[in-house]
Image: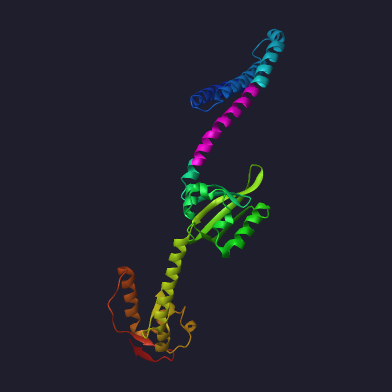
Amino acid sequence: MFYQNIARIAVILSAAIFIFFLIRKTARTPLRGTRFILAGFLLVCLDLTIGAIFHSGIISETWLMRWYLILGTISGFLGQTSGLLLLMVGCYLLVKSLIPTVNAHYTSLVENSLVGVYLIQDGAFVFVNPRMAEIFGYRREELMGKKVIDVVAPESRRIVEENIRRRIRGEVDSLHYKFGALKKDGTRISVEAYGNRTEYDGNPAIHGTLIDITERLQTHLLLKESEERYRKLVEASPDGIAVHQNGYVLYVNPATLKFFGYENADEVIGRPIMDFIHPDYHHLVKRRLRNLADQANEIPIVEEKFLRSDGTAFYV
């Protein structure tokens, strides 16, 4: 028991010394409250140390009886009451001093964000960042206070109003959706919005982000149109066109089906390409496929022997 108490005292003192230097170093920063935390922690450690000494058996019974009540009362009051009070005051001041720093970082992040950031209350914009105003072609002060529905395209107003209503009433916490919008000059754009339900000045509100996806949708549409034009050209081509990968057929156009005597593409797609090659040419085709894989470019055109659906052979 004696050695356990000695170890206990050593641990308390070591922790106190370590925390002392740690908080002392931190106290040199602009953060407030660290000195209160340091003082409170040291007083609590003092109370713990005195208690451990009194119960360790390293002092005589006579001395213990004479000073226990006095020192115990003083250390208990200073350590437990004053120490804990200083710790609470220090933590309060520390958190309070962090608020301006956190607000400054958040403000900088929002103001310089590459996406639009907004706050909506009572159906109007309470706050917008510079990027949000830029997306809609307004000055920032023009957009703040403006009704949300005024920048929404007519065909999207019902869904936008419904999504705002559902979040304000608490039916859902957040929503992610796309809708048509109007810029200040009347130009139509497509946007993608994400918003959460929150509270502002004690009343329900919506805060979130918004991005302009007009160019992305236009690019997707152009790509789709290009793919459709290419598909029509391939389908109408009088030449046989086929696509295969890893030795299996993925696509054939109508001309290819006609050459091989099949009526439906489902009869061909998914089958090994060797099913359509004459056995005498298997070795040649396999070698050409290996060369194509190794060279990753075009290989010379050669004559090959194929098999129709009825088993007759023909050259291509």
Res 55 visible: no
Q: Would residue 75 appear left or right of 247 to someone viewing this image?
A: right
Rendering quarter of residue 175 = bottom right
Give the answer, above or below, for where 268 lies relative to 211: below
What predominant SS class does the magenta segment belong to? helix
Q: Would residue 239 appear left or right of 271 to someone viewing this image?
A: left
At x 55%, y 25%, the residue is 34
Front-most of residues 182 and 293: 182
Front-most of residues 126 and 37: 126
Residue 9, given in percent of the width and then of the height, sits at 60, 20
Residue 134, given in percent of the width and then of the height, sits at 46, 52
Front-most of residues 60 and 229: 229
- The quadrant of the picture occupied by the N terminus is top right
At x 70%, y 12%, the residue is 68
For the record, the magenta segment spans: 83-107
Front-most of residues 148 and 37: 148
Identify the residue at the far left of this view.
300
At x 58%, y 57%, the residue is 149
- The quadrant of the picture occupied by the C terminus is bottom left
Residue 304, given in percent of the width and then of the height, sits at 32, 84
